[in-house]
């Protein structure tokens, strides 16, 4: 399988750190945040990577080039304007091919083992869920016997888990999608309604690196490894 790292976000909540540096290049325990993903994917045997970028994206390409120095092969998907998650993936599909691929949000830090990921037969997506972080009152999806289910009411939203930003997706999930900025969540919820999404829970380390404070948390956690 190939893997795609989403790295096109501007990192508004990270300002002023991201005024002159793209968020994926912010350091965590002495190396860029995105490098943790590149190395983890390489260890898992996922050596063909696609990385999208927009804000200050040329810095990413300069830092990692074609990936040779890290034992991977990187193809870059440049966006003139951020296309959000689904829009960015749709733009990159020609680079990803027709087979399922691993998706990783570039602004998380985790010890997840990517080698165990697979897309079950007949599914359009497989999601990795985590416990809700302190700043998030409600989860995104329920996990029932390996199936992803949309919460239907307040009680279920309280019991739901958070989508980690790690998934395996089939390109068929994006069939008929028009080009342009658009989020991924509506596609996942629609597929879940049809019983086409599976999932698993990750109980290890996971941090949504969305603020300077959480960047510091990731740095501390990474140094403890």
Image (cartoon, grey):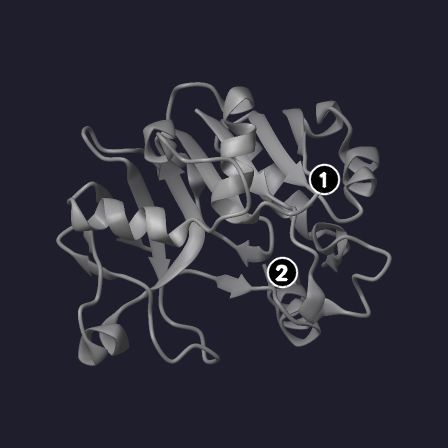
**Residue with the mark numbered 2:** 222
Q: Is residue 203 visible in the rendered structure shown here? A: no
**Residue visible at 26% across and 74% down in the picture:** 157
Badge 1: how crowded within 10 Å, few (<14), some, or many (20+)? few
Q: Quadrant of residue 224?
A: bottom right
Q: Quadrant of residue 154?
A: bottom left
Residue 160 in picture, x, y percent from top left: 26, 69
**Split into 4 quadrants, where in the image is the N terminus?**
top left
Q: Earlier in the sequence, mark 1 or mark 2?
A: 1
**Residue visible at 44% across and 44% down in the picture:** 113
Q: Is residue 225 above or below residue 188?
A: below
Q: Quadrant of residue 119?
A: top left
**Residue visible at 30% across and 42% down in the picture:** 126
Q: 74 or 81, which lies in front?
A: 81
**Residue with the mark numbered 1:** 80
Q: Is residue 86 above or below residue 73?
A: below
Q: Nearer the viewer, mark 1 or mark 2?
A: 1
Residue 105 in picture, x, y percent from top left: 53, 49
Q: 86 or 220, which lies in front?
A: 86
Q: 165 or 150, which lies in front?
A: 150
Residue 194 in picture, x, y percent from top left: 16, 44
| Left or right of residue 145: residue 57 | right
Q: Secondary structure at mark 1?
A: loop
Q: Is residue 140 above or below residue 167?
A: below
Q: How many numbered discs?
A: 2
**Residue visible at 70% across and 51% down in the picture:** 24
| Rendered image: mark on residue 38 | none
């Amino acid at each position: 399988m190939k893997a795609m790292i989403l790295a096109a976000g501007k990192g508004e909540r990270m300002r002023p750190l991201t005024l002159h540096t793209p968020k994926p290049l912010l350091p965590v325990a002495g190396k860029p945040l995105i490098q943790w993903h590149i190395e983890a994917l390489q260890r898992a045997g996922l050596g063909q990577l696609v990385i999208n970028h927009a804000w200050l994206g040329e810095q990413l390409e300069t830092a990692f080039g074609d990936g040779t120095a890290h034992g991977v092969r990187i193809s870059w998907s440049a966006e003139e304007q951020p296309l959000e998650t689904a829009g960015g993936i749709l733009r990159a599909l020609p680079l990803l091919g027709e087979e399922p691929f691993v998706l990783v949000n570039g602004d998380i830090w985790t010890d997840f083992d990517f080698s165990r990921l697979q897309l079950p037969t007949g599914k359009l997506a497989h999601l990795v869920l985590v416990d809700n972080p302190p700043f998030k009152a409600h989860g995104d999806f329920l996990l029932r016997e390996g199936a992803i289910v949309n919460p239907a009411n307040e009680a279920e939203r309280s019991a739901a888990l958070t989508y980690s930003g790690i998934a395996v997706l089939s390109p068929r999930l994006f069939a008929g999608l028009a080009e342009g900025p658009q989020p991924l969540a509506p596609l996942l919820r629609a597929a879940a309604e049809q019983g086409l999404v599976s999932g698993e829970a990750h109980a290890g380390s996971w941090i949504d690196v969305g603020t300077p404070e959480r960047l510091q948390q990731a740095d501390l956690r990474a140094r403890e490894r």
